[in-house]
Image: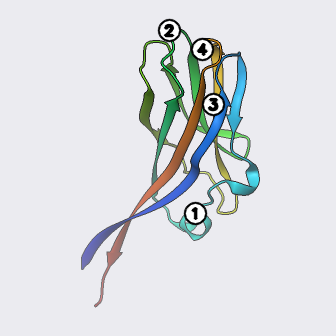
Amino acid sequence: MSSFTTKTVQPLEPGVSGVALDSVGIAHETAQAFGATLEDLAMLAYRRGKARFKLKLSTASTAGAATVRFLAGSVQVGTKDIAIGGAGAAIMDTLDLNLGGVAGETPITMQVEMTTAADAGVTAEVYGRVEVSTPLVVSGC
């Protein structure tokens, strides 16, 4: 019996530019049509998900906070609160995703909601991706 692990990486946001961070509210959300889908991976009993994201700021900000969410349809599967103020020119982080109940055709999207506005004129390039790790056991070979 042999065991293997595979990792599937699906980019969500390849660098959407000009996302305004200087007002409270939803600053950016992946269009449903461009969301990542699990497809046949959803048939597996065990699947672990991780999201990676990066906000590349146009300039450092002294203020601002945001919540980064990953959604499967309208269901939140992961969330992370981040500080924009004092963070420097780029904010990168990871978070675990709860993919247990996600159907194969359901798009997984990324949302950035500003909970506290950044300094006037601050924008960001938004990057995000979903990684799914799955064990594979082969027997009888």
Could you tell me if the residues under marks 2 and 4 are in contact, i.e. CB atoms within 8 Å? Answer: no
Q: In whole angstroms, how far apart are the C-alphas of marks 3 and 4? A: 13 Å
Horizontally, residue 104 falls left or right of residue 78, namely right
Q: Residue pushed farthest top?
A: 62
Task: Report the front residue among 85 and 3.
Answer: 85
Residue 92 at x, y percent in the picture: 42, 34
- Of all residues, the one furthest to the left in this rendering is 1
Q: Secondary structure at mark 3?
A: strand
The kind of residue on which mark 1 rests is Ala
User: In the figure, 140 relative to 8: above or below?
Assistant: below
Q: Earlier in the sequence, mark 2 or mark 4?
A: 2
Q: CA distance from mark 3 to mark 2?
A: 18 Å
Q: Which mark is residue 112?
A: 3
Q: Which mark is residue 62?
A: 2
For discs 4 and 1, the disc positioned in front in the rendered view? 4
Q: How many angstroms separate mark 4 from mark 1 (CA)? A: 38 Å
Q: Local crowd at mark 2 within 10 Å, few (<14), some, or many (≥20)?
A: few
Which residue, given by chain and number where applicable, does mark 1 sit on?
42
Assess disc 1: are there few (<14), some (14-19) or many (≥20) residues with their C-alpha within 10 Å of its C-alpha: some
Q: Which mark is residue 118?
A: 4
Nearer the viewer's eye, disc 2 or disc 1?
2
The mark that comes first in sequence, 4 or 1, is 1
Residue at the image position 69 percent from the left and 55 percent from the top:
34
- The residue sitting at 66% across, 25% down in the picture is 113
